[in-house]
């Protein structure tokens, strides 16, 4: 069972990230997944978090208890949710938006320059797809193939291609980060 | 009643990753609902959005009304015009609907009303979950009557129960309520929509006899009279006043008793056919958790933890909350030490469970003021208390 929390502020595509991943897992990877979300009354800018459970069996309790993966795209989200991440859990952060302050050895930290990569592709709005590609490569909780199949309908048709590119960019960077971690040099170096 | 396969136009067959709200709209469309009148309110708005978006493709009609009072009025008209009809609301909108819900009950008008419950009283916590309208749905309109209320625990069940709700509504000519909550409404999971030919829907029981013999009501205390479509040439009258079987006002105590015996009897005499539960681990259970909707999935964790700790605990999930399956609960109560009833309100359905159990075993209420689901630990503590 994967317990995953996506977090950041409203407008970053946090809920969209969880939706794409949940759709990929339940429709194309043949797993069970349950996605819940919490948000304030603001349309943009408020704290935003989405929870995703992925399992081989039917899911009863629909919330994360001890998340094994935390994706934090804002400092506020990092501060709020990092303490609940399990020991040895995977922490994915947008490296320009989040400066980690916690115990660096408690979790496996994977920073990604998602905004910069997205800007290189033409628009920072693609940053969430960079993060999803990165997340998929690091965790293997979902296959890249399933993620790409899940995109149509959840991103605008005219941006489908560039979103795929953003996903690939994050995915390749994630594989490299994993390799770097394996060599003991740390993903952030 | 004629069982027919669903109209393929309204059935979006295949696997989807969707939330409970969208699944409710899809279920209604699959059931043949082609008329929706409503007023948007969080957290139910997505049902209306989905229905409205699909209307042009399936040949349906969506009207945004000026308020929820008018929404039910429009449904009554739509139903007598021959359509299967639905609306959706939450919180304050449900309160506004109450008067005309009584009119729908009195005129035996089939309709489906979804309440995606949020936290009250009043505007309360508009974006957060609750199960606080469970007694309001039963008694919210004036006078004595019966309704049917279902409570789905997942997006898939939102789809399935929407179809069931329409079928029940057509069978008993009564408003049927889908009492879901913000959590299930906004939760995304896989929803499988079967091919149209595998979805069984009930066609309205249409009257086909001679025009001069038509009567809109039949006080059988059981199944109601067939209906006609306004404008098809049948003469009929209907009113919120106490009426006879022709539908005309009849202000006598005797007729009123006959009418009420029918409105109540058609539900009470069919509880076993209407009421559905999902039971697990009842065989050896010393404690049973009775819950409904999202709370049953929270209770599932407490029950699993209880079993791990060696407690013989089972579960009864009320898929149909009203009418309550009283005989089944009595049966359980005579075999167990205690019954635990968690719900996201300060104790509503538990009052009825206590009445039904009548001292046969302990009944422990696990209330929650709303805005979130229970901590499973609190339910587990109640289970431990009940088994003592």
Image (cartoon, coloured by chain):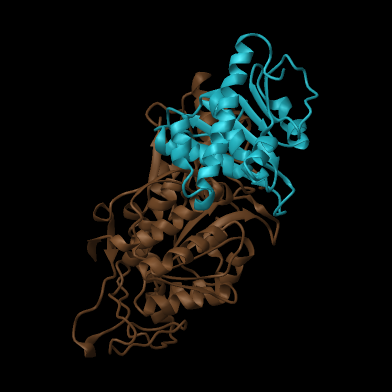
Chain colours: A cyan, B brown
Query: Disc count in the image?
Result: 0
Q: Residue furthest top?
A: A183
Residue A65 in the image: state x and y as whole percent. 61, 28
Q: Is residue A9 left or right of residue B331?
A: right
Q: Nearer the viewer, residue B28 or A130?
A: A130
- Please identify the quadrant where the N terminus of chain B is shown: bottom left
Q: Nearer the viewer, residue B377 or A54?
A: A54
Query: In this view of the protein, can residue A52 be seen by the observer?
Result: yes
In this view, B75 is above or below B45: below
Q: Going 49% across and 23% down the picture, which residue do you hit?
A: B307
Residue B177 in the image: state x and y as whole percent. 47, 60
Q: Is residue B331 left or right of residue A137?
A: left
Q: Quadrant of residue B228?
A: bottom left
In this view, B262 is above or below B305: below
Q: Quadrant of residue B109?
A: bottom left
- Please identify the quadrant where the C terminus of chain B is shown: top right
Q: Is residue B88 left or right of residue B92?
A: left
Residue B303 in the image: state x and y as whole percent. 51, 29
Q: Nearer the viewer, residue A22 or B171?
A: A22
Residue A63 in the image: state x and y as whole percent. 58, 35
Query: In this view of the protein, can residue B379 be seen by the observer?
Result: no
């Amino acid at each position: 069972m994967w317990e995953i929390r996506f977090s950041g502020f409203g407008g970053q595509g946090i809920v969209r990230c969880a939706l794409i991943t949940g759709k990929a897992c339940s429709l194309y990877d043949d797993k069970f997944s349950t996605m819940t979300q919490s948000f304030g009354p603001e349309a943009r800018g408020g704290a935003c978090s989405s929870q995703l459970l992925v399992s081989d069996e039917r899911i009863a309790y629909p919330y994360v208890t001890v998340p094994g993966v935390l994706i934090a795209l804002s400092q506020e989200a990092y501060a709020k949710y990092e303490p609940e991440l399990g020991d040895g859990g995977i922490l994915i952060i947008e490296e320009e938006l989040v400066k980690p302050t916690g115990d660096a050895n408690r979790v496996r930290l994977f920073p990604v320059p998602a905004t910069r990569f997205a800007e290189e592709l033409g628009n920072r709005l693609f940053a969430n797809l960079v993060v999803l590609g990165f997340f998929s490569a690091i965790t293997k909780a979902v296959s890249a193939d399933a993620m790409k199949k899940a995109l149509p309908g959840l991103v605008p048709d005219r941006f489908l291609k560039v979103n795929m590119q953003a996903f690939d960019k994050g995915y390749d960077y994630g594989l490299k980060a994993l390799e770097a971690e394996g060599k003991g040099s740390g993903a952030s170096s | 009643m004629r069982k027919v396969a669903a109209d393929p136009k309204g059935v979006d067959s295949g696997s989807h990753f969707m939330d409970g709200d969208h699944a409710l709209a899809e279920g209604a469309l699959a059931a043949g609902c082609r008329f929706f009148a409503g007023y948007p309110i969080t957290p139910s708005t997505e049902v209306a959005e989905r229905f409205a978006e699909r209307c042009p493709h399936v040949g349906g009609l969506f009207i945004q009304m000026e308020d929820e009072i008018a929404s039910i009025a429009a449904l009554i008209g739509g139903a007598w015009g021959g359509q299967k009809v639905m609306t959706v609301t939450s919180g304050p909108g449900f309160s506004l609907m109450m008067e005309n819900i009584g009119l729908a009950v009195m005129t035996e008008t089939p309709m489906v009303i979804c309440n995606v419950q949020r936290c009250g009283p009043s505007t309360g916590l508009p974006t957060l979950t609750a199960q606080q309208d469970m007694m309001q749905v039963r008694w919210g309109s004036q006078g004595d009557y019966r309704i049917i209320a279902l409570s789905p625990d997942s997006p898939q069940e939102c789809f399935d129960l929407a179809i069931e709700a329409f079928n029940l509504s057509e069978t008993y000519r009564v408003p049927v309520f889908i009492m879901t909550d913000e959590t299930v409404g906004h939760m995304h999971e896989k929803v499988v929509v079967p091919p149209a030919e595998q979805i069984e829907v009930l066609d309205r029981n249409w009257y086909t006899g001679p025009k001069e013999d038509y009567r809109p009501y039949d006080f059988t205390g059981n199944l109601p009279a067939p209906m006609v479509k306004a404008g098809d040439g049948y003469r009929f009258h209907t009113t919120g006043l106490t009426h006879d079987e022709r539908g005309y006002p009849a202000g006598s105590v005797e007729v009123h008793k006959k009418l009420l015996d029918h409105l109540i009897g058609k539900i009470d005499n069919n509880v076993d056919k209407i009421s559905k539960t999902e039971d697990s681990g009842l065989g050896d259970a010393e404690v049973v958790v009775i819950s409904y909707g999202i709370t049953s999935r929270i209770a599932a964790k407490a029950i699993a933890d209880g079993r791990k700790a060696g407690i013989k605990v089972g579960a009864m999930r009320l898929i149909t909350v009203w009418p309550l399956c009283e005989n089944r609960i009595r049966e359980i109560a005579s075999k167990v030490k205690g019954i635990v009833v968690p719900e996201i309100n300060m104790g509503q359905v538990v009052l009825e469970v206590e009445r039904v159990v009548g001292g046969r075993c302990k009944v422990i209420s696990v209330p929650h003021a709303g805005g979130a689901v229970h901590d499973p630990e609190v339910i587990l503590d109640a289970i431990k208390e009940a088994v003592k």
